[in-house]
Image: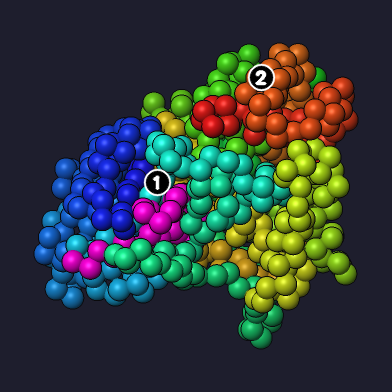
């Protein structure tokens, strides 16, 4: 787990090693254990290292193999690297390190561009060929690891974080109107390749970008998720599906124990994280577990310690409850915004930031339960989709924050244009590979929403403190299995039914048969007092007025009664505006 950076020039100039050094410095929190830079003519790459696999200096990056004429900078974890090393050794490849980075290079040398199909894990990397000048960028199937890039006629630059690319002075920092429409309409989800800035793009998940020495390039999607089912799938019993889910998740959790550092777990007390903890304990892990909580606000509980305690005691983990005084949240909000690659509106971002800060003092790598709701149908909008006759409209009605008319009232007229978000949803629902409306929604959420909301949040907030988070529910083989399960087995009994029934074989029933929980941050859920004033200060700042994204009449309407302007998913429309402006200010845009 690390931060990578690079520049490949096509205009005859030497790559700027000073720029790479600045990009490295910007990403220092992602890799506090080491740094390296390699430059040769038109190419320069850098990496900040978090030591998880092969703690020795043999695994330092950038990694160069002079015999093969290859180099790499890599962020992530390839969990099957021991098995791949054995196979590649039998094919005659020699290894000098014990980690996963070298395995990726050798796999590319062996299988060419097909090598990515052999990798199990989360990854974003840049491979480069010494003799041909080719550069290959790639991102994992579910987009767990980020990869941003900028491209003009003279150079390609890339990095693990968007702010790192802002170290280049010639980046176009203008607001991308399509991204703004997504952000304000599609619950702050901005799908690849767009970002909020015109000059920076992100590589889509499950995609390779091949860039030749003359600057010509192409992208290749190497994986997609299919919800098609054969006769055997349709005839399989619920019990068989349940048992397959448990077996597949057991494999996924076991894979994510591959590490040269002890692997802990984030334990919210919900069924997802509790099941992960149970399977880790079953695999013999000597576990440290962590929960976070806040004080209650009125009748709304600020923690779920009673459930995490049950799990921790049942499995005998070394458990730590981290209590955060909500008065500490507001002063830390600017830090959390600086840690964001892109603006995020979820109230739990700052909570995850503070949790990661504490956990990183004790552990370097943890497993976490993100992804189960999208993969196994845990959200409330899935059951109505079973009978939908207009799935695009029904999905948008529940998920989208505004209609196009309100968007045009909210933003300056220069950002007015087409209804990009609704067109995107329609395009995704019309793609092949999913025939039922509920499956289309599940696919949308797994491959789009999950990538640019919960998964991005986990990566950004944990890596801000040099903490690696592994997500077993996003093992691509488990995700493929879940897609084949008939939807009714997933969405029954308030959602995730097949997963909950699998969990009964591992964890206490009291954790399963409880009301659905959430990651509680009550003080940020309601904009009052100091939090409301903080929002007002952001949107009234001189730089915000000069930027002129939002129409003042619209903001005045939101400020007049913030709690009256709530999205269908119970988010604050006012906070959404402030979060964007706060992110832009935090990064000096």
CA–CA distance in space, label 1 to label 2: 30 Å
Q: Nearer the viewer, residue 454 or 124?
A: 124
Q: Secondary structure at mark 2?
A: loop
**In this rendering, does residue 539 appear at all?**
yes
- In the image, what residue occupies the spot 76% across and 56% down? 418
Q: Quadrant of the C terminus?
A: top right
Q: Residues within 10 Å of mark 1 (few under 14, many from 20)?
A: many
Q: Quadrant of residue 2?
A: top left
Residue bearing mark 1: 159
Tell me: 533 left or right of 169.
Answer: right
- In the image, what residue occupies the spot 76% across and 23% down? 527
Point out residue 563 in the picture as x, y percentages from the top left corner.
84, 27
Q: Nearer the viewer, residue 27 or 480?
A: 27
Q: Residues within 10 Å of mark 2 (few under 14, many from 20)?
A: few
Q: How is the image coloured?
A: rainbow
**In this rendering, does residue 283 appear at all?**
no
Q: Quadrant of residue 542?
A: top right
The stretch of residues the image draws in magenta is: 131-156
């Amino acid at each position: 787990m690390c931060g990578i950076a690079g520049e490949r020039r096509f205009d005859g100039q030497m790559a700027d090693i000073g720029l790479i050094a600045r990009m490295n410095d910007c990403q220092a929190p992602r890799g506090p254990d080491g740094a390296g830079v390699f430059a040769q003519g038109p190419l320069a790459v850098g990496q900040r290292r978090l030591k998880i696999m092969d703690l020795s200096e043999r695994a330092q990056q950038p990694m160069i193999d002079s015999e093969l004429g290859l180099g790499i900078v890599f962020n992530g974890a390839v969990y099957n690297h021991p098995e791949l090393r054995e196979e590649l050794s039998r094919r005659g490849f020699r290894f000098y390190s014990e980690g996963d980075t070298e395995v990726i290079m050798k796999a590319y040398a062996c299988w060419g561009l097909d090598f990515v199909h052999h990798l199990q894990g989360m990854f974003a990397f840049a491979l480069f060929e010494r003799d041909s000048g080719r550069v290959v960028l790639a991102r994992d199937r579910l987009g767990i690891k980020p990869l941003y890039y900028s491209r003009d006629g003279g150079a390609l630059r890339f990095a693990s974080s968007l702010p790192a690319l802002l170290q280049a002075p010639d980046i176009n920092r203008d607001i991308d109107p399509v991204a703004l429409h997504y952000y304000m309409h599609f619950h702050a989800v901005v799908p690849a390749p767009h970002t909020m800035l015109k000059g920076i793009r992100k590589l889509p998940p499950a995609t390779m970008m091949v860039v030749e020495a003359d600057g010509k390039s192409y992208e290749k999607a190497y994986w997609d998720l299919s919800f098609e089912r054969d006769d055997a799938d349709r005839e399989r019993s619920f019990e068989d599906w349940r048992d397959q889910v448990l077996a597949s998740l057991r494999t996924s959790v076991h894979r994510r124990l591959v590490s040269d550092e002890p692997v802990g777990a984030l334990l919210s007390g919900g069924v997802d994280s509790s099941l992960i903890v149970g399977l880790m304990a079953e695999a013999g892990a000597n576990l440290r577990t962590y929960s976070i909580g806040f004080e209650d606000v009125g009748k709304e509980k600020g923690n779920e310690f009673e459930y995490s305690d049950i799990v921790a005691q049942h499995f005998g983990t070394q458990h730590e409850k981290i209590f955060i005084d909500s008065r500490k949240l507001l002063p830390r909000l600017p830090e959390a915004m600086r840690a964001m690659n892109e603006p995020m509106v979820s109230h739990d971002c700052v909570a995850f930031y503070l949790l990661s800060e504490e956990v990183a003092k004790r552990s370097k790598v943890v497993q976490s339960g993100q992804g189960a709701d999208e993969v196994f149908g845990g959200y409330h909008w899935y059951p109505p989709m079973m009978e939908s006759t207009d799935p695009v409209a029904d999905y948008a009605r529940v998920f989208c924050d505004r209609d196009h008319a309100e968007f045009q009232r909210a933003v300056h007229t220069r950002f007015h244009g087409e209804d990009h978000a609704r067109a995107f949803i329609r395009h995704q629902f019309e793609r092949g590979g999913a025939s039922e409306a509920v499956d289309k929604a599940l696919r949308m959420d797994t491959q789009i929403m999950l990538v640019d909301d919960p998964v991005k949040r986990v990566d950004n907030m944990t890596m801000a403190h040099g903490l690696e988070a592994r997500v077993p529910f996003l093992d691509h083989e488990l995700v493929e299995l879940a897609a084949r399960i008939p939807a009714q087995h997933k969405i029954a009994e308030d959602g995730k039914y097949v997963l909950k029934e699998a969990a009964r074989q591992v964890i206490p029933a009291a954790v399963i048969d409880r009301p659905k929980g959430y990651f509680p941050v009550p003080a940020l859920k309601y904009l009052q007092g100091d939090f409301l004033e903080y929002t007002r200060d952001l949107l009234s700042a001189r730089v915000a007025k000069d930027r002129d994204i939002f129409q003042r009449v619209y903001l005045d309407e939101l400020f007049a009664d913030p709690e009256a302007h709530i999205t269908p998913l119970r988010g604050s429309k006012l906070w959404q505006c402030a979060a964007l402006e706060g992110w832009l200010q935090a990064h000096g845009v």
